[in-house]
Image (spheres, rainbow, N blue to C red):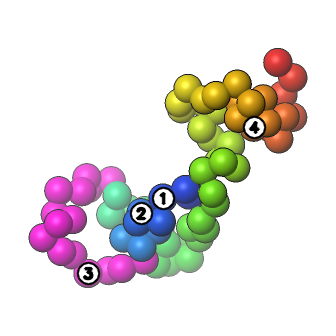
Amino acid sequence: MLVDNQSAIKLAGNPEFHKRTKHIDVRYHYVREVCEQGGIVLKYIDTTHQLADVFTKPLPKQSFKGLIQELGISA
C-alpha cells in the first residue's frame, strides 16, 4: 500500500502504544495487525505521485492532469 504520510507508516510499524496515540480509532489497529502478519506492506510515496489524491482532494490543474494521465484516464 502506497502511503504519503511517514508518521502513519511509523505508527503502523511500532507495536508500542503511547499517550499521544491513545486517541487513534480502533480500525487503525486492524491495519497494524495485518502489517505485522505480512498481509500488506506500507511503502512511502511522495504526495506528488499519490494517485488516490485525484479522488480525495482538490488539486492544482497541472497536478490533476498529471495524475489523471498516470491513471490512464482522459479528461
The answer to whether residue 69 is left or right of residue 49 is right
Circle 2 crowding by C-alpha within 10 Å: few under 14, some 14–19, many from 20: few
Give the residue at mark 3.
16
In terms of secondary structure, what is the magenta stretch mainly? loop
N-terminal of the two: label 3 or label 2? 2
Of the residues under marks 4 and 2, which one precedes in the sequence? 2
Gap in angstroms between the C-alphas marked 3 and 1: 19 Å
What residue is shown with label 1?
5
Q: For the residue marked with disc 2, what is the amino acid?
A: Ala
Identify the residue under disc 4: 67
Q: Is residue 10 left or right of residue 45?
A: left
Q: Residue at x 36, y 70 (%)?
A: 11
- Label 4 Cα neighbours within 10 Å, binned few <14 / some 14-19 / many ≥20: some
What percent of the width, then of the height, locates residue 55? 60, 30
Whole-percent x, y for residue 23 in the image: 17, 56
The residue depicted at 61 percent of the width and 68 percent of the height is 43
Estimate the spatial distance between the alpha carbons at disc 2 and disc 1, rounded to whole Å.
Answer: 5 Å
Amino acid type shown at disc 1: Asn
Query: What SS does tag 2 mark?
Result: helix
Q: Dots 2 and 1: beta carbons under 8 Å? A: yes
Considering only vertical position in the picture, is 35 above or below 15?
above
The part of the chain drawn in magenta is 13-27
Q: Quadrant of residue 70?
A: top right
Q: CA distance from mark 4 to mark 1?
A: 18 Å
Q: Quadrant of residue 75?
A: top right
Q: Nearer the viewer, mark 4 or mark 3?
A: 4
Q: Residue at x 56, y 76 (%)?
A: 38
Tag shown at residue 8: 2
Within 10 Å of disc 3 (Cα), the crowding (few <14, some 14-19, many 20+) is few
